[in-house]
Amino acid sequence: MSEFEKSRWADNEFSQNYRDEADVYLPFRRQFIEITKSFYAHFIDGNTKAKVLDLGCGDGLFIQELLQSFSPASVTLVDGSVKMLEAAKKRLEDKTNINFIQANFQELPAGEPLSENFDFIYSSLAIHHLPFEEKKQLYSYIYEHLSPNGCFVHYDVVLPPSEKIEKWYLSLWRQWIEEHPDKEMSKNLLGIPEQYKENSDNMPDSLESQLQVLKKIGFTEVDCYFKDGIFVLFGGFKQGS
């Protein structure tokens, strides 16, 4: 049994609850998506042959949002959860040139299910489930599958630099949940912030350590593009030939 199959994400009920509640307990989720779309518009949209890869695609929300504004040549979505891929297929059923691959992050380098390179690789709130060494392996794999001048954009949670900063970040997160109009739902989700690190499925690492890994692998123009508390958008480019 893989590590993914042992996690909560292999549980259909948990996956469904995530899809139903994500906008309530994920601060500025829509803003992170809009920033990523702005990034795509600025650096990728001029490439009419662009190939897009979404790693840990969930229910396909990001790709749906992307395709409302842009027309890449092809899109590949990868997720370890059967239920998530089914939800993504349903969400994108009217779209063409879409490929779906069921694979977890440990299986990607070992099984090599991806037979092509991509101009834009995105991942959302998934890589923090990996221990640091496996994060490094996945980042290397991502770099190998980027086309020249391609870019990687990663939206995820990170470990704050100190306990006092962490307490403040978590208070901001709880405030976001409390201010949601659905008070009954928000009340039930107030325990979510503490789980980002305490739950055994979650293994966040610092933003700085991950930026350094990307640079060491060979990514250029590595930076944090947007940040709110422990939620960050960061990535880099693969230099052109």
Image: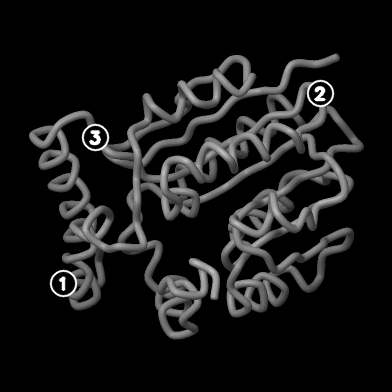
- The residue that disc 1 covers is 187
Q: Among all residues in the image, which is located at the extreme bottom? A: 13
Q: How many marks?
A: 3
- The residue that disc 2 covers is 148
Q: Residue at x 81, y 70 (%)?
A: 94
- Mark closest to the chain's N terminus, 1 or 3: 3
Q: Amino acid at mark 2?
A: Pro
- Mark closest to the chain's N terminus, 1 or 2: 2
Q: Badge 3: few (under 14), some or many (20 or more) residues near its Cα, within 10 Å?
A: many
Measure the C-alpha gap from mark 1 to mark 2: 47 Å
- Mark closest to the chain's N terminus, 2 or 3: 2
User: Does residue 97 sit above or below 172 in this rendering?
Assistant: below
Q: Badge 1: few (under 14), some or many (20 or more) residues near its Cα, within 10 Å?
A: some
User: Does residue 178 sit above or below 90 in this rendering?
Assistant: above
Mark 2, secondary structure of its residue: strand
Q: Residue at x 72, y 37 (%)?
A: 120
Residue 189 x %, y %: 22, 69
Mark 1 or 3: in front is: 3
Quarter assignment of residue 14 = bottom left
In front: 204, or 156? Answer: 204
Residue 39 x %, y %: 62, 30
Q: Amino acid at mark 1?
A: Lys
Measure the C-alpha gap from mark 2 to mark 3: 32 Å
Q: Residue at x 74, y 34 (%)?
A: 144
Judged left or right of residue 99, residue 69 is left
Mark 3, secondary structure of its residue: loop
Q: Please say if the residues under marks 1 and 3 sit with CB atoms less than 8 Å apart.
A: no
Q: Quadrant of the N terminus?
A: bottom right
- The residue that disc 3 covers is 160
Measure the C-alpha gap from mark 1 to mark 3: 25 Å
